[in-house]
Amino acid sequence: MAASTPTVVVTGAGGKTGGLIMDQLLADKEHFAARAVVRSPKSGARFAAAGAPVAAVDVASPDAQTALEAAFAGADAVVIATSAVPKIQKVREREERGRRRRARPPTRRPLPPHLPLIL
């Protein structure tokens, strides 16, 4: 891999779209260095096996900003292929169950401060 090979970070690499993008980048290692950002180590295992760096990040955790900054460090480009729908849907389902039980809705952990968009 040449020193001038651009590093591309793909968020949501464990999903369908992000996975397809990672596959294309890994197939062209001569021109790109791919880095995966996933929700769990299991969803990034195939990229790690292919030699790509993988960062498993829970965006709702207190150390998410530090983990994302490390994943994005030195990147030339970022592909954002994430979806918040699964997390939002689970929160809504818990809140609905809480309302039905006449209980308070669960408290949500605050999200980390907004990260700058890297183009």
Image: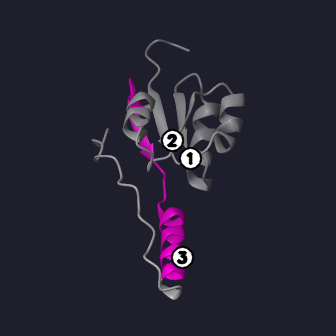
Q: Position of residue 20 (x, y in %)?
A: 61, 47
The foreground one among 42 and 98 is: 98
Q: Residue flagged by tag 2: what amino acid is it?
A: Val
Q: Label 1, label 2: how many angstroms apart (C-alpha)?
A: 5 Å
Q: Is residue 48 left or right of residue 106?
A: right
Magenta-drawn stretch contains 38: no
Q: Residue flagged by tag 1: what amino acid is it?
A: Arg
Q: Label 3, label 2: how many angstroms apart (C-alpha)?
A: 23 Å
Q: Which residue is mark 2?
A: 57
Q: Position of residue 29 (x, y in %)?
A: 59, 25
- Relative to 111, residue 72 above or below: above
Residue beneath the point at 47% across and 86% down = 102
Which color mode does the image show?
one colour
Q: Are marks 1 and 2 in contact (CB under 8 Å)?
A: yes
Residue 118's label in the rendered image is: none
Q: Residues within 10 Å of mark 3 (few under 14, many from 20)?
A: few
User: Could you tell which of marks 3 and 1 lies nearer the N-terminus?
Assistant: 1
Q: Quadrant of residue 79?
A: top left
Q: Quadrant of residue 26?
A: top right
Q: Quadrant of the C terminus?
A: top left
Q: Which residue is mark 3?
A: 93
Residue beneath the point at 44% across and 50% down = 60
Magenta-drawn stretch contains 93: yes
User: Could you tell which of marks 3 and 2 lies nearer the N-terminus?
Assistant: 2
Considering every residue shown, the one lying at the far top of the view is: 3
Q: Residue flagged by tag 3: what amino acid is it?
A: Glu
Q: Position of residue 108 (x, y in %)?
A: 41, 61
Q: Quadrant of the N terminus?
A: top right
Q: Which residue is mark 1?
A: 39
Count of numbered marks: 3
Q: Label 3, label 1: how many angstroms apart (C-alpha)?
A: 20 Å
